[in-house]
Structure formats: structure tokens, C-alpha cells
Image: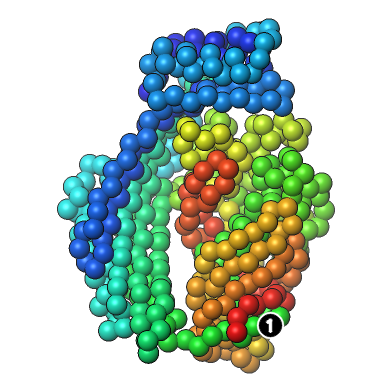
Amino acid sequence: MIAREICERVLQKAVSTGADYAEIFAENTLDHAINLVGGRVDSVHDALIAGAAVRVFRGLRSVMATTVDTSEAGLMKCAASAAEALGQGTAEIDICLKERLFGDIHPIKIVPASVANKTKVELLKSGCAAAAEYSDSIVQVTGTLLDVDHNILIATSEGLYAQDRQIRTRMSISAIAEVNGETQTGGCRPGARMGLEFFERVDPKAVGVHAAKQAVTMAGAGYCPAGIMPVAIGNGFGGVIFHEACGHSLEATSVAYNRSQFCGKLGLQIANEKVTAIDDGTIPGDWGSINFDDEGTPAKRNVLIEKGVLKSYMIDKMGGRRMGMESTGNARRQSYAYTPTSRMTNTFLAPGNETQEEIISSIEYGLYAKDMGGGSVNPVTGEFNFAVNEGYIIRNGKICEPVRGASLVGKGSEVLQRIDMVSDNLECGQGMCGSSSGSIPTNVGQPMIRVSSITVGGR
């Protein structure tokens, strides 16, 4: 993408006013999406993102400049802008780059860009047709097939010169059902760090049926009663609660600035002993996986909480400087236009020893939150509010009628203490996580868990 010798000269310019660290982040990314509405192609979207950022540190001060001109002249001008903004000092770094090959544990069999749109449309139509045919109650189906080819280069004053190519594929199908004049939406959005071989393990028809079934079930459901009760949270995307209510509070983005509910609690019991939480960017083919982060630190398996004890935070370089700790390989950014910060990769609660059946049978009266939706959280306090996309009342240890309009309200640190049963059926779901460094692909996951007591919003 950019020759090593050019990177050396650009970095030398970047540190010329006394920076103690400098980096170049360059990218060339192709986003491709096909959208279907009512079984017909509504749009085909192509976006090319290309440019570079030069970032410099001096102590706890950081400056970043960006450019779309990745010629040597353009990069030198960008580096000069960053160096000038940092202020005058004495340059003491001699830049000598050595290429590093991290290896790639995410082999791609079918590069999406090499496949005709016709083939992609057929895959998407198959899923959307399955949703439309599921029930006469389905009144609308929309679908998107997304593939991303993300190429990055990182060069740093510490001598690193590395490149990576990240290909991801995702299908999203949404269905609207109408029952007795009431409409509800269901959805299914699987994805992976894979090419189109993704559909060798994911059946588009199953994606469509999942979305339609959820919509029909919820359209025919009554409203959820409100109150404080035990809740069984389903596996897979149920992990979004930990991701939002607790995960963000374990990022240096919050911790380094003393804006987290978990500041100063390393080594302390912050959760029930049945809770072990992990962020692992090294899982082959997973949606949130990386070979190295956007600062060039190798991906790692970080145990955040082990049997209830806080073991680690997720840390980027600048956050590490503020905290006096090493980077954990969690620096991520949407594109060169964003400053990287500490972010999650594949974050999940580890499986326990109970079964799903044991958890359901242990609840005399409560809610089964089978599928979670979006919500909001304050990382300083951990207070959250999440919608339940698909929920059911539990009576006498049995899953009974579906209910809609449910939400879960609580505080992350309190919920961690109230997770008193963890099943063995770990699954993960895919999402896009937004923060100060933009929107990035992340996996969330968990086995089914029981929260002994939580506020359920409803009617």
C-alpha cells in the first residue's frame, strides 16, 4: 500500500518536533451491499474508503492528522501538520522499520469481490422468499447482503511495518407481520470474518424463517407485565447486555479517565463466582476477530472476569499510558478518519455447568428474554435499559405465552452479582458497536443465564 522506505521518511518527519511515538495508519476498503425490498433489488451500494492518518504522542498528549493523498508528498504534509500541532521539542528517534508478518488465521475461500452480483442476489432472494412464505401474516420483507474488503497498513516509530486484509460477510433479513391489526418486526443478522463460503455453514432460508417466525410470534403476543422478577436471558445475542452494561465499562476509554463503575477494582470480586467473561480477538472466522489491532498490537484472548474476580481491562496505547499498563490488543477504529480507542472484539460469558432446562425449571414466575434488542447504557454508572425483541412468560418452570413490549432495566455491577445460573449452550451473535472511534464489527455472546432479580419494564 505504501512502501516501507516512504513510511520511514514520513515517520521521521512526524517525530521532528519531539514526539516520543508516531504511527501511520493507511487503509483501502471496499464496502459492497445489495438491498432487497419485497423480493426485488432496491439498491446496490459500493463505497471506497481510502486514506491515511498520522498520529503522534508526547507523554499524554496526542495529535492526529488525516489525508486522502497517500503519495509521499501528501503523507509528508500530513506528518508535518501533526508534528506542528504537537508543538516544538527535540527529535530523538531514529526510525528503522522492519516488516512483520502476523499470519492469518482467517483464510478466505471465496473472495466476495470475485463473485457476480447475480449470485449474491440469488442468495439474498432465497432468504427473503423463505421469510415471505413463512406465513400469510408476513406483510413485508427486506434484506441486505453485505461484504467488506478492509485492507490496512500500520507503521510505527517503534519499528513495526505490517499489513492485513480483513474480509467480512453478513446477511440481514427483517420481516414485518400483521396479526389482528397489530404489526411487529423480526430479524436475523448472522455474519463472519469469511468470504461467501460463509453460506456453506449458514442457510439463507433459515435466516429468513428465523426473522419471519419472530415477527409472527410477537405480532400475536400480549403485552409483558411490569415488575421485579427473575429473568432467563437467552444465549447468543443475549450477550449484548454484558457488552453494553459491563463491557464498555471495562474499556480504557472509560477506565483511564476514571469514568467507569469498575475503576480501581482489579483483583476484586465484582460478579457472582459463576461469571467468567472473556474478550477474544483470536477466534478463527469470527465476526469481531482481528490478526492485530489498529495500532499493530497482536490480537489476544483477554480474560476480563474469572469466577467473579476482575482480572483485566481492555487497553489501547494511550489508555495504557494513562493507566500505567500495556496494550491488550483492543485498539480499534472504523476508518483512518477516526482516532483509535479501546474497543471489544468477540466478547462473551463463558459456559457454565447448568442446562437450559434447569434454568427454566428453576423459575416459578418470570420472563424468558429469548432475543435481545437495542438499548442505552451509562458507562460511568452502568445503568442500562434494553428492549426484549422476543420474550415469553415462565410459569411453574415452563415457557408459556409470548409477550411483547418488555424491557430490562438495571445496573451492570448489580446484574453481575445476580447472575446465579449459567448454562452450557454458548452461542454468539453479530453486531456493529458504536463509540468515539466509530462503528466496528463485534461479536457478543453467552450461554443462557439466570438473573435472580431484575426490573422488567412492560404494562
* Camera-side residue of 106 and 185: 185
Circle 1: residue type: Gly
* Camera-side residue of 99 and 61: 61
Q: Residue at x 53, y 49 (%)?
A: 434
Residue 320 position by quadrant: top right
The quarter of the image holding the N terminus is top left
Looking at the picture, how far across and down is residue 243, in whole percent?
60, 57
Residue 50 position by quadrant: top left
What is the tally of numbered marks visible in this picture? 1
Q: Residue at x 26, y 61 (%)?
A: 36
Residue 361 position by quadrant: bottom right
Which colour assignment does the render follow? Answer: rainbow
Q: Residue at x 51, y 54 (%)?
A: 443
Side of 268 relative to 380 (left or right):
right
Looking at the picture, how far across and down is residue 21, in whole percent?
63, 20
Looking at the picture, how far across and down is residue 418, in whole percent?
74, 70
Residue under label 1, please give it.
Answer: 227
